[in-house]
Image: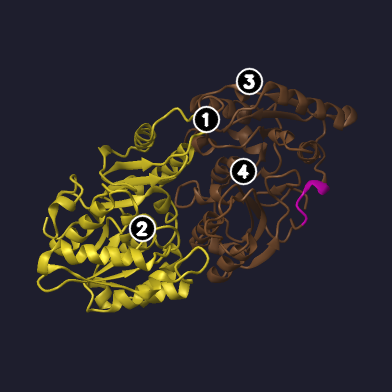
Chain colours: A yellow, B brown
Amino acid sequence: MHKGKLRIGVTAPASRIEPALAEKVAAIARTQFADRGPELVFHPQCYLSSGHFAGDDEARAAAFVDIANDESFDALWIARGGYGSGRLAERVLPALNAAARKKTYLGYSDAGALFGAMYADGFQNLVHGPMPADLLREGGETAVRRALAFLVEADPRSVEASVAASHPTAAFNITILGHLLGTPFEPDLSGHVLMLEEVAEHMYRIDRALLHLTSSPNIRRVAGIRLGRCSAIPPNEPPFGQTEEEVAKHWCAVSGIPYLGRADIGHDIDNKIVPFGRLPGI
Amino acid sequence: MHKGKLRIGVTAPASRIEPALAEKVAAIARTQFADRGPELVFHPQCYLSSGHFAGDDEARAAAFVDIANDESFDALWIARGGYGSGRLAERVLPALNAAARKKTYLGYSDAGALFGAMYADGFQNLVHGPMPADLLREGGETAVRRALAFLVEADPRSVEASVAASHPTAAFNITILGHLLGTPFEPDLSGHVLMLEEVAEHMYRIDRALLHLTSSPNIRRVAGIRLGRCSAIPPNEPPFGQTEEEVAKHWCAVSGIPYLGRADIGHDIDNKIVPFGRLPGI
């Protein structure tokens, strides 16, 4: 647990957020912890716009490095997913210093493209969990409060229930992890319980991506796979004929990977905290 | 060029076709070459249906192996793309015999998932080009005739114009090649001119997939990339702000891969023949 006032820097390596969203999240942080609330600093880069992205690659990479390398920040919180984090890996990784390696990083979905690369590079405090943009979901305050409770108080109720001292864990969006395979940014997941979730992909694409993942010799060395929620799946034409859990079980059986059941993660307000590696203190 | 009557076996490792389509393609083959027309044999598996697929994995794999291993067939022609070929790789590859290694294989799109794996396994007569299902496109007879002219007469006009003796080539759908990276089915493309095409993917997905491909140490050893057509791209929200060629040039520049210009391939009736490796006789 953190001693003084926790300082959290927020940056947006993928899509932008609105200043009004930042204000609402800051207001939650102020009221959630009485006098022990964190200091939340939204980097102005969060509000930039460059086509698909919250500013161009240079601006997004610079903001990430600004916060990561600043030892006055205890944590770097990813503002939002979308697409764009992976574009920064080759630019950001060589620029990170010793302070960056001590920091906690929190986010999910597209952020996994950077987190995976950082985990491959030996970073130890990477965490899958809710982001400020989750406030845009109905009931999203629950998710934002969970993320803050984890960062500020290491609240054990924020953590996915199957996370245990017995195995390191990792959590990824299925598509994002697939796009790391065969690159220098592919993390070694040997012995990990791998939690996977997906959103807005056709079932045939989920099947194809899980075939890809479970064909990887690296992924075949995981301790097992847990399937998070796969939400907003567009209708398959013709109907695919299998649920996402049947698909996951099939590829686990084919590849010899233990299927361990469901994980309490996904693109929703119930999305829980999952550490990359082991949580400190458990 | 083939001496006697060429025998072509057709199988559908992904989506099914209708018997009426097979009849129309057979009729084209009968009239295109006077008395030198090929014998076209559609495996009955082409018409099976199992959810998304032309029969279950076992039926599709068995049909592929039936034709591939039968030395009375000179060529195996993939009936149609969709999704499903990659599901068969681990099942089909160990079952293929010496006759299979002498045969010519023709197809594109999803078929690349099997062709890539076979190329990784040393198969030498794999060819990207039109399929029977291209007859469903407006003006599709042109594409079907081109495929047959290549198989029956090795017609040089059927071949993509930049294919040359100076470099081996390979042609893939971008998404399909991405799903081979980091698996035992990833072909070694060192020194190849790599031609890439895409269909029905958002520009941000094309960008993400090309970031993935060009981050691969294997792909960074290609002689260069040529971009085929990227068609039916759904609107990006917000607008991506770059064309597919700008995206391809960007990732080639970042990764140090020579960008060689456009390739005359794509999901359309102008899709040309591209060999995996070198064409015999050039």
- Residue pointed to by mark 4: B109
Would residue B73 be counted in the magenta stretch? no
- Residue pointed to by mark 3: B44
Judging from the image, mark 2 belongs to the subunit labelled A
| Circle 3 Cα neighbour tier, 10 Å, few/some/many (<14 / 14–19 / ≥20) | few
Secondary structure under the numbered disc 3 in the rendered image: helix
> Residue A131 is drawn in which quadrant?
bottom left
Tell me how far mark 2 sits from mark 3, CA to CA. 45 Å
User: Left or right: where does residue A49 sit relative to residue B239?
Assistant: left
Task: Give the residues in magenta.
Answer: B156-161
Q: Position of residue B228 (x, y in %)?
A: 67, 54
| Circle 4 Cα neighbour tier, 10 Å, few/some/many (<14 / 14–19 / ≥20) | many
Tell me how far mark 3 sits from mark 1, CA to CA. 17 Å
Judging from the image, mark 4 belongs to the subunit labelled B
Q: How many marks?
A: 4
Regarding residue A217, the answer to whether it shows in the image is: no
Q: Above or below — where is A123 with respect to A238?
A: below
- Residue pointed to by mark 2: A112
Give the label, 2 or 3, closer to the camera.
2
Which circle marks residue B255 in the picture? none
Secondary structure under the numbered disc 4 in the rendered image: helix
Q: Position of residue B251 (x, y in %)?
A: 55, 66
Judging from the image, mark 3 belongs to the subunit labelled B
Secondary structure under the numbered disc 1 in the rendered image: loop
Which circle marks residue B52 in the picture? 1
